[in-house]
Image: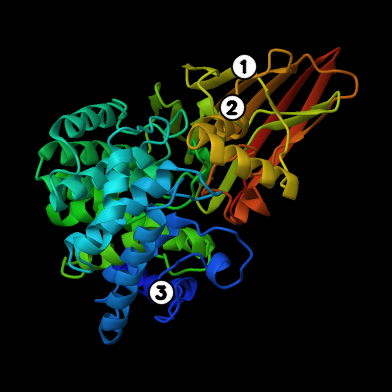
């Protein structure tokens, strides 16, 4: 853990000035405490994204890192809460991406951060009571089932509001939301994120589950967090890294706070799992190749910043543990999430069968990723790299199988006219517009007229053998390998990754194609490079 402590602290020291640059620091300005630099400084936005106000809570938790700046950080944290309060009072409050949005993430995460500032003494409840009351009314009546990290954050915000003033959230509303929220956790341990698991957002969920446990003193939230840790541990310990694009939402990063809490407050099994995950993910977190290096300033001002600063306080007094034995790389098939883990012949392969059979494999220092195919025909683009429960999946005698129709994709581009229409529609429709936009950008069904696709992957004699079959191809069809990037619109994904430049390292690939009528069979073999 010594390397983890030093590395995380180094990251915190580097990122803190970048975060401070984002906030309006002029106490004489009416914009004092706003964290959207594009609005208060560059003037290139016509509204402030209020979810960024979480940065004020990050500063509050960073006071121990910079004791000489503690008074300054406290003042900015209070200004953050006052600015949030003013925005929460406006019609269409809790904007993130466009005016009058009434978005759930800014409601949930922003309210949780401001309520904790209040509970921890950064600002009095009287100064932000109006905003807290507005937020309480929405949290009690809204529910986000498809992005569970947001819903768990909303539940934690409700718990914090009840701690501030029990009259803000009724007991009946609280119990109803608790029951519905905990039901979002799958028996395998993950919470629903756009139709599947995403261990990046699952780490965010664990942060909020610990907040719930602390705020309520109830063990059911610790139990839920433990199940989530077990799922993360199984994948990370197998792959010796995060799983990035194999997540349902393509999230490369994991936040550390909730993981570190198990070191201090978990049982022996939880401590070992958390220690192994933390060593794998964060021992080199100050390296330019680490996922933290690619996180943009916007998301440092979200939950990532305060998760990092809070984790430093948790682990500072935890002694260095002895080295834990590695987990054996054995075959496991998670039939609900669709992950197939194969450890055979010095190759560790993890497949996301519900993502069109995308996979990543490692052997020694080598690593490859395969993200399927893109087909262009009849003026349309079809992709296999798309998380969906419509894929038919299975494992037969160690062979991973995925089949179904491809997904048609059309790129959306912004324009002034589209933004004008969006603002007018949002003012009229409020939060009802969000579901329509998500159906266009995120939740799609496979096209009935699209080419059908089948993938079979196995490890044979130290080689990864992939057999892909595409049917219903037209004469003008162009079939090429998909890059790392997903066509699905899922914030906060799409940070730079080395796989954007190269998907193959330490392996050699060969390909054979057989075409017959409208059918194409592609056999791909990945071989581990021989050591000299």
Q: Which of marks 2 and 3 is nearer the N terminus?
A: 3
Q: In which quarter of the image is residue 450?
A: top right
Q: In which quarter of the image is residue 116?
A: bottom left
Q: In this rendering, is residue 108 above or below 32?
A: above
**Classed neighbour count for the residue bearing mark 2: other residues with Cα under 10 Å, few (<14), some (14–19), many (≥20):** many
The foreground one among 262 and 341 is 262
- As drawn, the label of residue 356 is 2
Residue depicted at 30% across the width and 30% down the height = 185
Q: Quadrant of residue 198?
A: top left
In 3D space, how far apart are the residues under numbered discs 3 and 1 (Cα atoms)? 46 Å
Q: Which of marks 3 and 1 is nearer the N terminus?
A: 3
The foreground one among 219 and 398 is 219
Asked if residue 527 lies left or right of residue 108, the reply is: right
Residue depicted at 31% across the width and 42% down the height = 154
In the rendered structure, are the residues bearing label 3 and label 1 in contact, judged by CB atoms less than 8 Å apart? no
In 3D space, how far apart are the residues under numbered discs 1 and 2 (Cα atoms)? 8 Å
For disc 3, the marked residue is 16
In 3D space, how far apart are the residues under numbered discs 2 and 3 (Cα atoms)? 39 Å
State the image coordinates of residue 61 (x, y, percent, origin top left).
Answer: 27, 68
SS label for mark 1: strand
């Amino acid at each position: 853990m010594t390397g983890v402590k030093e590395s995380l602290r180094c990251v915190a020291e580097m990122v803190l000035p970048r975060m401070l640059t984002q906030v309006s620091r002029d106490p004489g300005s009416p914009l004092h405490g706003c964290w959207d630099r594009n609005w208060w400084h560059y003037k290139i936005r016509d509204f402030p994204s209020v979810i960024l106000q979480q940065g004020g809570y990050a500063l509050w938790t960073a006071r121990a890192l910079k004791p000489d700046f503690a008074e300054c950080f406290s003042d900015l944290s209070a200004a953050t809460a006052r600015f949030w309060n003013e925005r929460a009072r406006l019609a269409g409050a809790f904007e993130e991406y466009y005016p009058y949005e009434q978005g759930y993430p800014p409601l949930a995460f922003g309210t949780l951060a401001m309520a904790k500032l209040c509970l921890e003494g950064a600002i009095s409840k009287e100064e932000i009571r109006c905003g807290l009351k507005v937020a309480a009314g929405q949290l009690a009546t809204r529910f986000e089932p498809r992005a569970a990290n947001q819903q768990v954050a909303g539940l934690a915000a409700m718990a914090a509001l009840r701690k501030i003033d029990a009259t803000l959230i009724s007991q009946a509303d609280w119990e109803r939301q608790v029951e519905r929220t905990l039901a979002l956790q799958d028996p395998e341990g993950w919470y629903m994120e756009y139709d599947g698991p995403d261990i990046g957002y699952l780490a965010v969920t664990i942060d909020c589950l610990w907040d719930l446990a602390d705020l309520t003193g109830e063990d059911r939230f610790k139990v839920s967090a433990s199940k989530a840790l077990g799922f993360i541990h199984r994948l990370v310990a197998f792959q010796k890294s995060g799983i990035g694009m194999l997540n349902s939402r393509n999230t490369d990063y994991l936040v550390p706070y909730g993981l570190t809490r198990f070191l201090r407050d978990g049982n022996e099994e939880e401590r070992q799992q958390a220690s192994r995950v933390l060593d794998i993910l964060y021992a080199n977190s100050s390296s330019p190749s680490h996922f933290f290096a690619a996180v943009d300033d916007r998301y440092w001002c979200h939950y990532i910043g305060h998760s990092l600063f809070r984790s430093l306080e948790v682990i500072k007094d935890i002694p260095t543990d002895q080295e834990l034995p590695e987990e054996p790389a054995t075959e496991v098939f998670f039939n609900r999430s669709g992950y197939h883990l194969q450890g055979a012949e010095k190759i560790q392969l993890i497949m996301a069968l519900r993502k069109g059979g995308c996979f990543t494999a490692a052997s020694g220092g080598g690593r490859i990723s395969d993200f399927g195919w893109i087909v262009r025909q009849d003026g349309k683009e079809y992709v296999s790299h798309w998380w969906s429960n419509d894929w038919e999946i299975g494992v037969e005698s160690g062979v991973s199988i995925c089949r179904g129709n491809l997904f048609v994709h059309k790129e959306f581009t912004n324009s002034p006219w589209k933004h004008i229409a969006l603002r007018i529609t949002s003012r009229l429709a409020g939060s009802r517009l969000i579901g329509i936009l998500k159906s266009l950008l995120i939740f799609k069904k496979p096209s009935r007229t699209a080419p059908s696709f089948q993938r079979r992957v196995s490890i044979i004699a130290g080689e990864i053998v992939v057999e892909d079959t595409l049917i219903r191809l037209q004469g003008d069809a162009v079939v090429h390998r998909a890059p790392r990037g997903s066509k699905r619109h899922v914030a906060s994904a799409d940070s730079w990754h080395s796989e954007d430049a190269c998907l193959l390292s330490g392996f050699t690939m060969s390909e054979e194609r057989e075409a017959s009528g409208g059918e194409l069979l592609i056999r791909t073999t990945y071989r581990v490079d021989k050591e000299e």
